[in-house]
Each structure stands twice: as C-alpha cells, then as structure tokens.
Image (cartoon, helix red, strand yellow):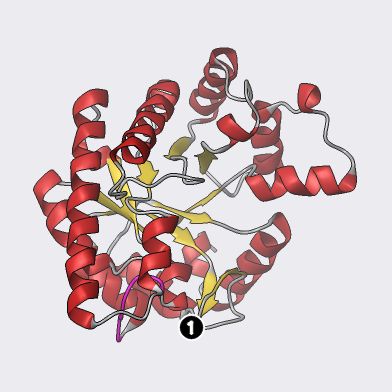
C-alpha cells in the first residue's frame, strides 16, 4: 500500500510576524527559495509537496519576483516536487455586494494566478467567501433571511470565480474551493456549475465554520471525495478551535488517514502548522498510523 502524500507550507505570514518579533527580519536577505529548501531539509525529505502562500507577495512587495518564481520552479523540477498555490485571502471578498470590492478581489486573484503559473501547480486554493461573509454567518438573523443571503453570497461568488477562470484560462479542476467560515453545502451548485475542485480543511470542519457535519470530516469526504484535490491538515474542536497539532483535539486521525488510504487518495495533505507542531503531528501519525508514512 502506497503511503499518503504529506506536504508543507514553508513560510507563512505568521513566520514573517515572528521574525519581526525576534528582531531578525531583513527583507533584503530573506530568500523564499532558500526557505523552501530548508523546510524540506529539516524534515529529512519526508515531504514531496509544498504550498505557496500568495499573501506574502503583497505583505512583502517583490518577494515573489519573476526571478524567484523561475528559481523556485527549477528547484521543484530538480527534486520532482509538486506544489499548490494558496491564493490571497487578506482583505479579499469575492462574494461582496459592493462591485468595486468584488472586482478588486477578482483582479488580485487573476494577478496571483498569472504570477504563479510558471510553477505548474496541481491546484490554486481559493476562499470563495471572505471576512464579510464570515461576519454575516455569526449574526443572529431569522433562518429564512440567513438562507436568502447565503444563496446571494454563493451566487455572487460563483460569478467571481467564473470571471477568474475565463480570464486566466486555467482548467476548472485546477481551482480548489476551500471550506471556510460559510456553510459549504451552499457552494454545491457553484462546484457543479463550474466543475471545480475542493480543498478540505479539516480544522475548519471541526471548528464548526463550514456548516453541520454529523460525522465530521469523514462525512465531508464522503460528500466531496471525487472533487477533493488537497487537504489542509490540522486538529480542532467546536467551537472555533483550529490549527492545532494532531492528536490533541477532535480529529479522528486514524479514521481519517485509514479512509484516505482505503480510497487511494493521491493528493497532498498539507500541514497548516508551525514546524514544531508538524513534528509533533508526524510523531503522532507514526505512533497511530505508520503505514500512512510508509513505515
């Protein structure tokens, strides 16, 4: 039985903030390609996949220039790695009723996709809804009103995603909608109409962000397995606890990994955790489901 394909996110916004706090940040000396390489070396080449966080291109202007993208692609090809791209989410709202905000968000996504096409990613992960919709989901509204607005947000998001696809001309299955703080079942028509992929975020399901799932992550997998191209892997608990190392909260890790092995899932399981939490999670997997790591 082939092991599962685990992946990493080499450098995130939280790492950037940590460097500021430690007083070690010198933007002119931070080389993204070196950060990616060191992440693989730190874990004894266990990983074969990495996910690029596109918000960094806007937090650190020039961080992802054309030369960096070229070098990163050469590194990827040389080592036979795969990659995925997490499109920007900070300040983005593809479902906004404000056409100016929505169009700005669409343009940002298009720019990020064009910038990273050179990496030939397996997918671009996208948040179809953002903080505005997240805030709405927490309002105490009558159910009929909440459902009306949810349908409106889903339809508006579909229009935005369609514009992104038409402009960039990437394959529809290359765009993976992540389950965020919006009942994911509201996105089902959009997924079917545009023939999109799905990025399952395990912690978001457990935290209660993505609607009610009586059987948790396993039910989500049963519903969308044919569309799931990638997982964001971390532990969590209801209400609103996520991005925790495996084995500490409510994720049934053995059940999840055994199910993915049984279904012969080939996509990456990307740890959305700190390096320390990744190591702790790997140790937990080694103890509970070693065959997932090829042991």
In this rendering, is residue 252 above or below 35? below
In this rendering, is residue 128 above or below 69? below
How far across and how far down the image is residue 218, in percent? 32, 76
Total numbered labels: 1
47 or 226: nearer the eye?
A: 226
How far across and how far down the image is residue 249, in percent? 57, 82
How far across and how far down the image is residue 72, in percent? 56, 24
Label 1 crowding class (10 Å Cα cut-off): few <14, some 14-19, many 20+? some
Which residue is most to the bottom? 214
Tell whether position 212 is magenta: yes
Q: Which residue is mark 1?
A: 238
Instruction: Identify the secondary structure beneath mark 1.
Output: loop
Q: Quadrant of the C terminus?
A: bottom right
**Residue at (71%, 26%) from the top-left corner?**
31
Q: Majority secondary structure of the magenta segment?
A: loop
On screen, residue 239 versus residue 97, left or right, reads right
Residue 287: which quarter of the image? Answer: bottom right
From this viewpoint, is residue 196 visible?
no
On screen, residue 94 versus residue 295, left or right, reads left
Tell whether position 138 is magenta: no
Which span of residues is magenta-colored?
209-214
Which residue is most to the top? 67
């Amino acid at each position: 039985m082939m092991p599962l394909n685990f992946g990493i996110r080499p450098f995130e916004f939280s790492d950037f903030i940590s460097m500021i706090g430690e007083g070690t940040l010198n933007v002119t000396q931070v080389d993204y390609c070196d950060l990616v390489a060191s992440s693989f070396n730190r874990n004894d080449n266990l990983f074969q996949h990495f996910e690029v966080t596109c918000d960094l291109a806007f937090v650190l202007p020039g961080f992802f220039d054309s030369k960096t993208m070229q070098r990163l692609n050469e590194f990827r090809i040389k080592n036979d790695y795969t990659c995925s791209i997490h499109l920007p989410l900070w300040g983005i709202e593809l479902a906004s009723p404000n056409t100016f905000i929505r169009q700005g968000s669409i343009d940002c996504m298009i720019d990020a996709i064009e910038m990273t096409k050179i990496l030939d990613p397996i997918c671009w992960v996208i948040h179809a809804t953002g903080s505005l919709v997240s805030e709405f989901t927490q309002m105490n509204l009558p159910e009929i009103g909440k459902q009306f607005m949810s349908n409106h947000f889903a339809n508006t998001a579909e229009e935005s995603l369609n514009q992104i696809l038409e402009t960039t001309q990437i394959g529809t299955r290359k765009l993976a909608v992540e389950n965020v703080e919006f009942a994911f079942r509201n996105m089902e028509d959009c997924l079917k109409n545009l023939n999109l992929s799905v990025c399952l975020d395990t912690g978001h399901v457990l935290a209660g962000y993505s609607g009610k799932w009586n059987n948790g992550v396993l039910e989500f997998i049963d519903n969308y397995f044919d569309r799931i191209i990638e997982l964001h892997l971390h532990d969590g608990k209801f209400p609103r606890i996520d991005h925790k190392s495996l084995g500490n909260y409510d994720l049934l890790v053995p059940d999840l990994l055994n199910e993915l092995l049984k279904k012969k899932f080939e996509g990456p399981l990307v740890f959305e955790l700190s390096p320390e939490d990744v190591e702790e999670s790997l140790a937990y997997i080694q103890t509970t489901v070693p065959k997932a790591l090829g042991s």
